[in-house]
């Protein structure tokens, strides 16, 4: 059907508009399916883990007789029941599937109980008695350093001569900072459902950010080829990095139980067990010595990072590497020496978490700059601006040798300072504090510069499939996973624009290893960059096939064919997209294609930690005002203004939602979310009763977010930038505002020794330090 050109609707791109999340309506109605909602196959059994109650010990045996005597208990699995490798297929090869000769933390999984019901399996698991001979446990990171207890060798990165620079510096400070970990607290806990298929094949439903790795791990443990295992994930109820590697454990354990009994097996962890078994954000301990001039500009830095890794390497290597990469945050480090120790402790093996070491690297430098400002009697924002990367000669290259391009830090910070009325509020806070004896206020404006790409270059690749059906509808499958962040929605927008069809015509199906092989984890904030581009290329192949077909019909060049608003337009005719599809099919034109993308420009030498590990940087800044109660140490965030760089936004509503959520999650990390281990290695904060994530009541009434208006200067999909992780670090402004409030309350000019999270107890302690003597102050003038 031909349509007169005058009747063409104005083309309207799907990308750039705030379309609803593709699952929003189903989620609100309770109709969105998660792993535990999948109808269970007849004969399904349920597993529960048997946990170590000792932090370190020799495993002498396991008494399972009482558990096995319960009616409905089908089996107890131990290390001897693993038909393939008894070591998980993690890159370091240092973590057993089940504990074998030793246990290495409280909560380590020794085996599984399999039973007819969930509650029976959990009850029986507590009746299994491991026989453990206790051994000395290392629970303190400095004890680990002294004992040279590491999961991986130490790493040092240097530029210039930090020692000489410190010797020449007009001023020096030295100090320490302790930064706690963080529980992922995904709404949907860890879960896997393993179903035996014909001919020793397996279908695994896994709540995972990395289906390809789950496939590999399961095959490795069962002793079969990868092609015999299919892993599917339609969506997760949150991940935040906690389901990047550690979802693989659940899938392996469920598959082993299903293999032993030749029955489907589901394993869903109880929330308390989830806390005890799975790793967290890595806690870090820092020691530093810094030199600076009268203006506050850095001239030398020696920094020691102690990463609390837990009992195995997991992802501690790349996490600790990224902490090194982001120790500069937004600032030029002239002469610097950073040493990173990856310390082995008898605790859970810590893992990926939003920011992946970047937040830990950034916060120490922000704390240092805040203390420098207070030492010199300067505005902390002024000191920060004087240290920013700039186009000034030799001040635009990172300490790992990457040039900082597309740098918008100066104008972005200046604009936020103006729109947030930073100087006026700072003056008003000083006036408030003079008249308020108990409640003191503070303010801080801190920037973020976050590198986007996997630091392991090989993971920066993606694949996708695009199928166009005879009715003109489109199905997309790609290697990324949906965990609520809106990846599938953005991919659908990108494909809709490439084919010129409404977004309602495009559907994205479940992540599936039988469709896209060897996919990288949905992590490093690169989900849309990688999978969106791969899907765009796949759609482009189909579009090119259709364009070539229409060219033949109308006798025009390929460049004359337009796809927009559900129409295919040439200078000679206008057709409905679905009519072109039907005609193309009748003429045996391929209506599906694959797409592949690999990130350009990046290179990285992992032995020297130098090169260009990132395709580009995402920038942002936040201005936060807080109040503290000097009698109790309690604090409240009063107002937040954010200006964040997402490039040309594919979906502004989703991007703003990510900024809001990332900031609040970061605020929790730095204020209320405290992980406490006892002196016997028990994680005592293992439930919502003792571990406090932010609630709606913690979100300030004034919470203003604006998007920086410029597109990505690199050739990224739609000119966009990643948005998953960078906003998390904006919450460092909360921590610095609290330190500012403490300093104003004390008014003694000393450095503020406040560790994170800044709980009421820690704020109160920081307020009282000046009354206890300068020998207690860890950050001091040399």
Image (cartoon, grey):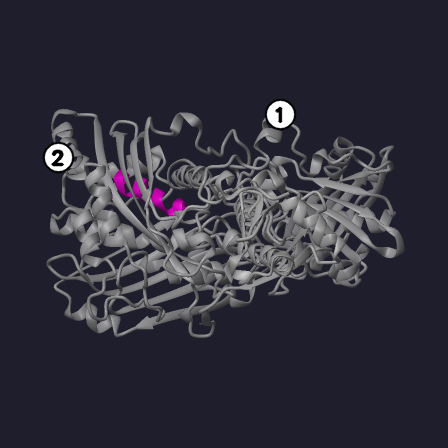
Residue 514 sits above or below residue 773 on the image: below
Residue segment shown in magenta: 727-738
- Kindly check if marks 2 and 1 are in contact, taking CB atoms under 8 A apart as contact: no
Q: Is residue 631 magenta?
A: no
How packed mark 1 is, by other alpha carbons closer than 10 Å (few <14, some 14-19, many 20 or more), is few
| Whether residue 755 is visible | no
Secondary structure beneath dot 2 equals: helix
Report the predominant secondary structure element of the magenta stretch: helix
**158, 597: nearer the viewer:** 597
Disc number lying in front (2 or 1)? 1
606 left or right of 250 in image: left
Q: Badge 2: few (under 14), some or many (20 or more) residues near its Cα, within 10 Å? A: few
Q: Is residue 649 visible?
A: yes
Quadrant of the rendering where the C terminus is positioned: bottom left
Taking depth in this image into account, of 595 and 52 the one nearest to the observer is 595
Residue visible at 61% across and 65% down? 91
In the rendered view, tell whether residue 694 sits above or below residue 717: above
* Left or right: 316, with 629 as reference point: right
Q: Pointer 2: what residue?
A: 427
Left or right: where does residue 124 sit relative to residue 525?
A: right
Which percent across, then down, holds residue 388? 23, 58
* Label 2, label 1: how far apart the Cα atoms are: 49 Å
């Amino acid at each position: 059907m031909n349509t007169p050109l005058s009747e063409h609707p104005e083309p309207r791109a799907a990308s750039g508009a705030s379309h609803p999340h593709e699952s929003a309506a189903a989620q609100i109605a309770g109709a969105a399916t998660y792993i535990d909602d999948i109808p269970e196959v007849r004969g399904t059994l349920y597993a529960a883990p048997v946990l170590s109650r000792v932090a370190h010990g020799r495993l002498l045996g396991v008494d399972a007789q009482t558990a096995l005597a319960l009616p409905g208990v089908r089996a107890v699995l131990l290390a001897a029941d693993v038909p393939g490798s008894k070591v998980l297929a993690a890159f370091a090869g240092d973590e057993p599937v089940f504990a074998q000769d030793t246990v290495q933390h409280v909560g380590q999984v020794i085996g599984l109980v399999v039973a007819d019901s969930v509650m029976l399996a959990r009850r029986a698991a507590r009746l299994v008695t491991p026989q453990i001979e206790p051994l000395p446990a290392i629970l303190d990171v400095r004890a680990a350093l002294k004992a040279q207890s590491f999961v991986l060798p130490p790493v040092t990165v240097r530029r210039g001569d930090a020692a000489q620079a410190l010797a020449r510096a007009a001023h020096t400070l030295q100090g320490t900072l302790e930064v706690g970990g963080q529980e992922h607290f995904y709404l949907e806990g860890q879960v896997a459902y393993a179903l035996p298929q014909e001919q020793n094949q397996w279908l695994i439903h896994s709540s995972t950010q990395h289906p390809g790795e789950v496939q590999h791990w399961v095959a490795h443990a069962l002793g079969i080829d990868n092609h015999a295992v299919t892993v599917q994930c339609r969506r997760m109820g949150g991940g935040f990095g906690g389901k990047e590697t550690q979802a693989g454990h659940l899938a392996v354990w469920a598959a082993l139980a299903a293999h032993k009994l030749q029955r489907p097996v589901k394993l869903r962890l109880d929330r308390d067990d989830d806390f005890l078994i799975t790793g967290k954000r890595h806690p870090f301990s820092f020691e530093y010595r810094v030199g600076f001039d009268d203006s506050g500009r850095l001239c030398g830095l020696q920094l020691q990072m102690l990463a609390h890794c837990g009992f195995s390497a997991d992802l501690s290597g790349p996490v600790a590497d990224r902490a090194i990469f982001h120790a500069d945050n937004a600032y030029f480090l002239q002469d610097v020496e950073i040493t990173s120790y990856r310390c082995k402790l008898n605790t859970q093996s810590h893992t990926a978490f939003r920011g992946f070491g970047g937040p830990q690297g950034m916060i120490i430098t922000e704390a240092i700059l805040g203390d420098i400002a207070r030492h010199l009697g300067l505005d902390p924002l002024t000191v920060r601006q004087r240290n920013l990367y700039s186009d000034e000669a030799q001040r635009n290259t990172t300490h790992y040798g990457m040039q900082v391009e597309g740098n918008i830090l100066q104008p972005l910070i200046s604009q936020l300072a103006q729109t947030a009325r930073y100087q006026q509020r700072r003056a008003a806070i000083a006036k408030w504090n003079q008249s308020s004896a108990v409640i003191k206020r503070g303010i801080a404006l801190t920037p973020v510069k976050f590198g986007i790409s996997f630091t392991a270059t090989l993971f920066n690749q993606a694949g996708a499939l695009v199928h166009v059906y005879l009715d003109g509808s489109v199905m997309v499958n790609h290697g990324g996973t949906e965990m609520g962040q809106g990846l599938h929605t953005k991919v659908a927008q990108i494909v809709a624009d490439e084919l010129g069809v409404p977004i309602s015509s495009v559907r994205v199906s479940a992540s599936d290893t039988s469709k896209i092989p060897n996919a990288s984890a949905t992590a490093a904030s690169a989900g849309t960059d990688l999978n969106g581009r791969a899907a765009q290329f796949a759609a482009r192949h189909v579009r090119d096939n259709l364009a070539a077909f229409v060219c033949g019909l109308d006798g025009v060049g390929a460049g004359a064919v337009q796809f927009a608003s559900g129409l295919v337009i040439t200078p000679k005719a206008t057709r409905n997209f679905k009519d072109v599809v039907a005609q193309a099919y009748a003429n045996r034109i391929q209506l599906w294609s694959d797409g592949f993308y690999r990130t350009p420009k990046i290179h990285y030498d992992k032995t020297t930690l130098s090169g260009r590990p990132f395709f580009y940087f995402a920038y942002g800044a936040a201005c936060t005002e807080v109040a503290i109660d000097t009698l109790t140490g309690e604090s409240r965030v009063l107002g937040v203004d954010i200006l964040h760089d997402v490039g040309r936004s594919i979906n502004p509503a989703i991007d703003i939602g990510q900024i809001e959520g990332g900031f609040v999650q970061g605020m929790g990390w730095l204020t209320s979310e405290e992980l406490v281990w006892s002196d016997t290695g028990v994680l005592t904060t293992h439930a919502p009763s003792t571990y406090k994530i932010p609630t709606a009541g913690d979100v300030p009434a004034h919470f203003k977010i604006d998007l920086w208006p410029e597109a990505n200067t690199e050739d990224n999909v739609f000119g966009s930038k990643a948005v998953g992780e960078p906003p998390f670090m904006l919450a460092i402004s909360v921590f610095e505002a609290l330190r500012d409030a403490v300093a104003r309350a004390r008014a003694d000019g000393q450095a503020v020794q406040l560790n994170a999270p800044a709980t009421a107890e820690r704020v109160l302690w920081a307020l009282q330090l000046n009354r206890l003597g300068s020998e207690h102050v860890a950050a001091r003038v040399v």
